[in-house]
Image: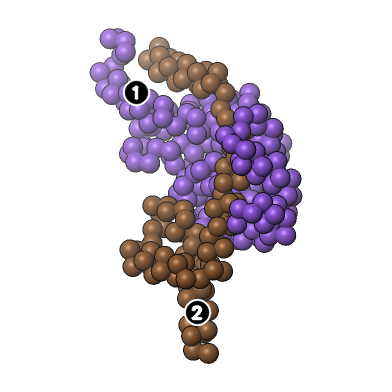
Amino acid sequence: MNDSQPQDSAPRKARFREWVEPEIEVLLRVAQSITANRADAEDLVQETLLRAYRAVDRFDGRHPRAWLLTILRHTNANMHRRQRPGTIGDWELIRAAQPAFGRSELPSAEDSFVDQRLHEDLAAAIRALDPRFRAALILVDVHDLSYGETAAIMGVPVGTVMSRLSRARQRVRTSLRSSSLVRGGLS
Amino acid sequence: MTGTLRQMLTCHWSARRIQRYLDADPAAPLTPGEISRLEGHLATCARCTRVVAEHRTLHRALSLWSGGMDVDPGSVQRIRDFLTTINDEDHA
């Protein structure tokens, strides 16, 4: 820290760093899902951090991840609106799931089987979902976000996330019952 | 007949809680009593046990996708640098 800073600025900056640093990877992962592009994801996260910094004095420090993800959602909506009039659909949250099929390192032969046999059926089942349900499934099951964090990103109550997640999982399970999920002998 | 009806009702009760049980999300916890009752039912109900297994398999399959969505360490570093820049420029 620079000694020339105002005296009350250093603690604020320290708190901001403390809240943001642990969340950088989560922010980038979610941003990649939204933008489907690493460069765009970095731009989105940078813009999000700028807005967060401007708003930091109004933040009480509770649940920084949810706070940052909420800002990221609003930032993305604003950036998207600037580029293309109209509203952003939840499908935007999902597009990036596709490149994930190209993962190069698999933990085990069993995982490899699941990855190879399931991914096409899984992708088809997920594509068939209503975009709102699809977003909940991807954010919770792919990104391992909590209900609260997912609610923050989607801008809906936690109960709505749970409901959408339940429906999404049910529909995907039903869709996969006649395919790889059962054939794989894992159920 | 009564036993079958009771079983169906318990399956219905369980089906409404399996997601919360598996996710164990702090926003929607089950009570210890609910957990105990659900686990007791799963110990005897093949159908609900299969549903739990399918949930776990699906979650695992979806988790594998995230392997291809790993964050580039270079991106992380650039964001860290940007964070430093924000702090440095704030008082400029």
The local secondary structure at tag 2 comes to helix
- The quadrant of the image that shows the C terminus of chain A is bottom right
**Of A11 and B50, the residue lying toward us:** B50
Q: Residue at x 49, y 44 (%)?
A: A145
Q: Which residue is mark 2?
A: B7
Provide the chain ID for the residue under circle 1: A
Q: Residue A13: which numbered mark, if any?
A: 1
Left/right of residue A54 with respect to residue A169 in the rendered view:
left
At x 47%, y 51%, the residue is A147
Q: Nearer the viewer, mark 2 or mark 1?
A: 2
* Image location (x, y in percent) of residue A121: 73, 49
Do tag 2 and tag 1 residues touch (Cβ < 8 Å)?
Answer: no
Instruction: Please indicate, yes or no, whether residue A161 appears anywhere in the rendered image.
Output: yes
Looking at the rendered image, the quarter that the N terminus of chain A falls into is: top left
Identify whether A124 is placed above or below B79.
below
Q: Secondary structure at mark 1?
A: helix
Chain that is coloured purple in the picture: A
Is the residue A4 above or below the residue B4 in the image? above
Query: Who is closer to the viewer here, A161 or A6?
Result: A161
Chain rendered brown:
B
Q: Residue at x 52, y 84 (%)?
A: B4
Residue count near mark 1 (Cα–Cα under 10 Å), binned few <14, some 14–19, many ≥20:
many
Name the amino acid type tagged 2.
Gln
Residue extending farthest bottom: B1
What number is the disc on residue B23?
none
Asked whether B78 or A97 is in front, the reply is: A97
The way the protein has been coloured in the rendering is by chain
Q: Is residue B38 visible?
A: no
